[in-house]
Image: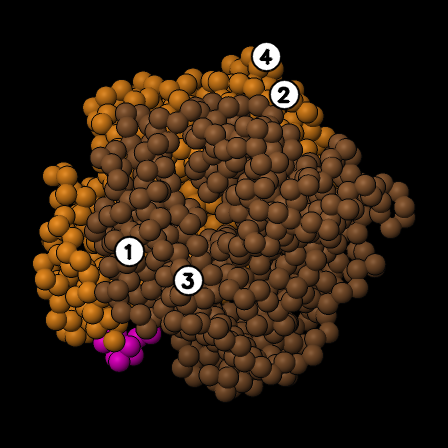
Amino acid sequence: MIKQAQEILSLLPSSIQYADVRIVDQQSEQIATKDGVVEALESSTSRGYNVRILKNGVWGFAASNDSSKEGVEATIKKAMEITRASTRYKQEDVALDDQKPVKATYKTPVTEDPFAVPMEEKITLLLEADKAQRVSDTIAISQTSYQANREKKYFVSTIGSEIEQEITWTGAGIEASAVSGGEFQNRSYPNSFRGQNQTRGFELVRELKLAEHAPRIGQEAVDLLTADLCPSGTFDIILDGNQLGLQIHESCGHAVELDRVLGYEASYAGTSFLTPEKLFDFQYGSPIVNLTADATIPGGLGTFGYDDEGVPAQRTFLVKNGMFEDYITSRETVTTLHKINPKYNKKSNGTVRASSWSRLPMIRMTNINLEPGDKRDISRQAQTLHNSNGSKAPGASWRNGLKISSAHGGSLEELIADTKYGIFMSTNRSWSIDDKRYNFQFGTEIAWEIKDGKLGRMLKNPTYQGITPEFWNSCDAICGRGEWTVWGTPNCGKGQPSQIMYTGHGASPARFRNVKVGVVKW
Amino acid sequence: MNKSKLKSIAEQIFSSSHAQQTEIILSVSNNSLTRFANNQIHQNVAWKNLGVSIRVVVEKNKIGVASTNSFDEASLKQTVARAIELAKLQQPDPYFQSLPSPHIIPTVDQSTYSATEEELAAGVNEIISAAQAKNLTASGAYSNDTYQLAIANSLGVWAYHKGSSCNLSTIVLGKDSSGFASDVAKNTSEINPAEVGNIAVQKTLESAHPQNIDPGEYDVIFEPQAASEMMAFFQWYGPNARIYHEQASPLSGKMGKQVFGKNITLIDDPFHPDIFPMPFDYEGQPKKKMTIVEKGILKNIAYDSYYAKRYDAQNTGHALPAPNTLGPIPLHMYIAPGDKTRNEMIASVKRGLLVTRLWYVRVLNAKMLNITGMTRDGTFLIENGKIVKPVKNLRFNQSIPEALNNVVAIESKLTRLASFEGELVGLMPTLHIRGWHFTSGTLF
């Protein structure tokens, strides 16, 4: 296939500045069960290629599933026509960073190929879990889902890169819904919205032990029907890792996408409050908050070998000791940022991906992580935050004298024991954030009251809201590595035309002080 | 690719299937999209595809689905074999009886239009020029899609439709404000990019220097885009047979009952001349105009063949492609117009907010249809019937059924709307809603 990609590349005229060709072959398999019936059993394949051309300082992109000689010629012609149309109204030339050519292969390490596991076995596993959730007549709906995806990508470019990759990712989850009168409550395991997903094989699905957890999930859905409503007010909250993953996704991951920051997404998803002048000079979070973009974590859903511009996967600090350090970037956006902020002189950190052969690659989250707490941070708590000039960094005013907790870096049990009164929230139910990523509101499926260091009564319909830097500056404890999991978010939407991408978020439970809770009128 | 070629592909697939029943969905698409930001085109793309999805039934009620976009003989045979193999491994679905039988498909306009890249770029340039003239920054997308859809099954269903759409939307940015406008039509000649640009520019200028405002309950004037962003969630979670019978819809058990205010009539009309006609659903069953709510009373919900048979109801032609875990959805629903003009509606508000559009709307509780989200791209305070100042954006938490019981007035005309973030509707009037719940503000 690399040869075929090179043949397409060789047909491009010499007048172009740069071009790349991607051939993509996608395979997927999905099973969904509901109330003991297999509701969906689907297998799909999609193959195609695209050419991306930079000519006269503008991009042209065309894609097709027709790989005949005529089809390829028509696709190249279309891409060239597009560059001509864009050139006429050009205002500034696109510039790319310098990258060395890469000749490499990458393959997701998989212990058990999900496509080789017999279908009967997968169906049986799901139906057992489906049934085990029905612990009561009030369970109105029991559902399970499983998905496996394989993407073979062949990339060549005019700088001489030749990259062949095979990415495999797998996921599964269960969900029980209980109904009584006007009350309707859901519980999911291990996470809502298609469960847990990772770049791993069927071993992930086996490790989840869906059927073992199903009775507890069913019972929690039933118990939520009669649980007390989550109180409204300002409380300390502990977010479970599966909820914190989405919090990171929405309030950090999207906010650090450099294309958004530069206005490229203004027409749809919006912009970002993390504008270029804040780079290296903004207190995004408390000093224990360390956020990374890391496409190299084994098993992370945003893990790969090379991005769709041929840039190697990397680990980058976005927020270090609370300070805003970097964006997730592309070959084009780093050159634009350098013009705006000459202090920024980095190359792409390799985060560009496309959701299929028919889509233009763009900056996407890789694995955006809240690094686990480290007990050594506690000794730093007396330090005052300063920026490089020695003055107090913008954003630090949101900290309000926060001190790092002695439970930082420990277990969830220790963190709960360290909390006099608070609310522990788990498993996302709803999410929403404004178009600059300031004001957010999340709802979770379930919560428990914490009193004097112990988990107490179950609470239904929990929600919390805040302003992003204020919220992250209120973080006083993050559980340690032992509680850390890379959660998969397989449904991240961005771009026009829309692209759904799979991303990962490493997180362990963390505590946030004085958060606005339960403001929704039910 | 054309109708007869698609039919011959369908016949080729039927000849290689030994399943009891076979259904084929063939889709052809040719798409162009010119995207702009910072007053210049930055993403300009085109793509085309031909895909097939095959659903087979074996042993009466075991179903498998396989799809591909490779059309050589071997790949098609392999895809049929894969679907049959999956079906054989399936568990029986006790509620499935049969694929649907053929019915007469209504005739609708099938004209198509393919825009050139130059044409889209020139339209974009008109918007950029309008923004630059006021020292503003334009972003947006102008797209053209032509499509063919053919559905066939082994019981004799054959349905074919083709069409096209042109979709233009823009967000114009000022220093501390933004404005939105859009249009959608079958042909670029029906879209006036300069006018779309001018509307967005005007919104941006009017919303400059927004002021803080306390959250709380307000009367709201929802412009058509905001109304459609709210109603999209009602379409998915309200009159949907699957959700209705699972007792998970706010409408569950309320057929024939007053569910909304008497001024609310909801119509699903796949043949409305101002939107894109769709003569059949994804099982090749004929569509028809359907009243969902009439003067606040629930009259009909959407069914496909599966849920119609399962719950002994009439199939209303609302199937989505198999396998469908969402349930049947009314894709062409709008609120019937009222008798007021937009200006009359604003003039009747003592104190309230004019909302251009909503953003990041999500469901908090499907049973109650509580939603949360933000305002975006132009929010204004109205006092004593007049727009007095722009305000910073607000977050809301609101029950849709409650809102549809609090509609005070409805605009007398319907506005054509582009799909922006999953909205399905093509038409919507301006709404005046009493007591909308805003719960917090943001910094811009």
- Identify which amino acid the numbered label 1 is placed on: Leu
The quarter in which the C terminus of chain A is drawn is top left
- Residue behind mark 3: A204
Mark 1–mark 2 Cα distance, whole angstroms, equals 49 Å
Mark 3–mark 2 Cα distance, whole angstroms, equals 48 Å
- Magenta span of residues: B69-77
- Identify which amino acid the numbered label 2 is placed on: Asp
Mark 3–mark 4 Cα distance, whole angstroms, equals 61 Å
- Identify which amino acid the numbered label 4 is placed on: Asn
Q: Position of residue B422 (x, y in %)?
A: 43, 45
Residue A1 in magenta stretch: no
Q: Colour of chain A?
A: brown
Residue sitting nearer the eye, A7 or A97: A97
The reply to whether residue B37 is visible in this rendering is no
Q: Is residue B106 left or right of residue B346?
A: left
Q: Vertically, is A171 above or below A510?
A: below
- Identify which amino acid the numbered label 3 is placed on: Leu
Quarter occupied by residue A56: bottom right
Q: Is residue A460 left or right of residue A383?
A: left
- Residue behind mark 1: A126
Marks 1/2 same chain: no
Q: Position of residue A361 (x, y in %)?
A: 56, 65
Q: Position of residue B19 (x, y in %)?
A: 13, 67
- Residue behind mark 2: B214
Q: Which chain is in orange here?
A: B
Q: Vertically, is A424 above or below B102?
A: above
| Disc nearest the viewer among 1 and 4 | 1
- Give the chain of mark 3: A
Q: Which is more N-terminal, label 3 or label 1? A: 1
Residue sitting nearer the eye, B16 or A315: A315
